[in-house]
Image: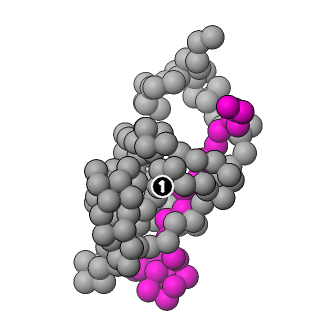
Amino acid sequence: MAGPSWKGKKRSEMTKEELAACEKARAACPKVKKTVEIAKMDVDQRLIYGVVLVPDVMDLQGDICSKEDIQEAAHDYLVNSRIIKAQHRAPTDADVVECYIAPVDIPLGKGVIPAGSWVMVTKVNSEAMWTAIKKGDVTGYSIGGRGTREEI
C-alpha cells in the first residue's frame, strides 16, 4: 500500500490538495505532549540545553523510541520546522543554535545523556521567555506530535 502523496515533501512543495489532506490527517490524530527538563543553562549567553528524546526509554504514553526513530524525528524537525513555541502556542523569539544526536554517552548538567539521545540548545532572545525560564515558570522543552498507534 502506498503512503500519502505528501510523504517526504516540504510544505512548499505540496499542492493545495496535498496540504488540505495533510491538515485533515493531522486534525484526526491525537496530540501527544512530553515535557523535558532543562539540563543546563548558560545565563550569560541566554542558552538552555535539554534532551528532547532518549532512546529505549518508555515515555508517558508507554511508547519507546529507537535511535533510528529519534534521528528521523530530529532531522525532520530541522528540515521542516526549527520553530520554538511558547507553551505550544505562538512562536517565541528563540533560535535553535545546536541540535544533535549524542554519538556517545555525554555528561550534561547534573547527569549523563545516553548515546542516541536528541540534544537541543536554544538561544532565548525574548525577554519575557527568558524571565519565565529564570523564574522557573518554564522548565524545559516539550515535544508535541500526532500519530496513529499501531500494535507491533
At 35% across and 76% down in the image, what residue appears?
109
Of residues 76 and 37, which is closer to you in this image?
A: 37
Asked if residue 37 is positioned above or below residue 88 in the image, the reply reads below
146 in magenta: yes
Image position of 104 (left or right of 81): left
* Image-quadrant location for residue 20: top right
State which region is magenta: 123-152
Residue 94 in sight: no
**On the rendered image, what quadrant is the C terminus found in?**
top right
Find disc 1 in the rendering and name its residue: 53
Find out whether residue 109 is within the magenta segment.
no
Element class at badge 1: strand
Q: Residue at x 40, y 54 (%)?
A: 117
Horizontal and vertical percent position of residue 144: 59, 53
Q: Where is residue 139 in the image (x, y as percent from the top left)?
A: 51, 76
Q: Position of residue 28 (x, y in %)?
A: 74, 37
Q: What residue type is labelled 1?
A: Leu
Q: Can I make out residue 121 in this image?
A: yes
The figure's colour scheme reads: one colour
